[in-house]
Image (cartoon, rainbow, N blue to C red):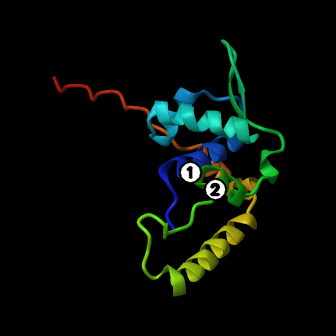
């Protein structure tokens, strides 16, 4: 199963917000994750509605991980962003094998197994250990000063 781009972005944004020592901004998230700002803003809004992030407007505002977000599972976030659609839509166009198809059932089982594994992982688990400090190193590297010209 392949996750859509916004789901991938949501998980990475949640991880980075979870380890950030202070509130961050949409611009900072976009820059550190090398993602388009407009997409990050939309994903942040959805994560805020899901209770993963807290957003604060104003000059001293920003984005922070919600207090209870660490207990949410990766599966819950994936379901929220991916929806409940089947891996392969069999109705449009109508499949002539639908009457006695075994593939559809197997694909449903595979999708359920995929999500069951993700349900075993909490968002907090994604940033435990060395992952947290590594996330803090993401972003553009400072540009070194230009070398002096030889005289």
Q: Residue furthest left?
A: 151
Q: Are marks 1 and 2 in contact (CB under 8 Å)?
A: yes
- Provide the secondary structure element on which disc 2 rests: helix
Percent position of residue 9, x then y: 54, 46
Q: Which residue is mark 2?
A: 78
**Which image quadrant is residue 50 in?**
top right
Task: Looking at the image, tell me whether mark 1 or mark 2 is earlier in sequence order.
Answer: 1
- Provide the secondary structure element on which disc 1 rests: helix
Instruction: Please name the residue shown 63% across and 79% down the image.
Output: 109
Local crowd size for mark 2, using a 10 Å CA cut-off: few (<14), some (14–19), many (≥20): many
Local crowd size for mark 1, using a 10 Å CA cut-off: few (<14), some (14–19), many (≥20): some
Q: Which residue is mark 1?
A: 7
Image-based side of 117 in relation to 89, left or right: right
Q: Nearer the viewer, residue 22 or 92?
A: 92
Percent position of residue 36, x then y: 44, 35
Q: Which mark, residue 87?
A: none
């Amino acid at each position: 199963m392949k996750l859509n781009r916004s789901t991938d972005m949501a998980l990475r944004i949640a991880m980075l917000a979870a380890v950030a020592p202070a509130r961050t901004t949409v611009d900072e998230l976009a820059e550190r994750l090398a993602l388009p700002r407009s997409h990050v803003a939309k994903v942040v809004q959805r994560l805020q509605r899901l209770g993963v992030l807290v957003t604060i407007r104003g000059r001293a505002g920003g984005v922070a991980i919600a207090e209870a977000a660490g207990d949410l599972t990766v599966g819950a976030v994936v379901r929220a962003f991916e929806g409940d659609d089947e891996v392969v839509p069999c109705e449009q166009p109508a499949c002539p094998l639908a009457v006695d198809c075994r593939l559809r059932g197997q694909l449903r089982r595979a999708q359920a197994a995929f999500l069951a594994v993700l349900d075993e992982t909490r968002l907090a688990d994604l940033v435990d250990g060395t992952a947290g400090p590594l996330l803090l190193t993401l972003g553009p590297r400072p540009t070194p000063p230009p070398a002096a010209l030889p005289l």
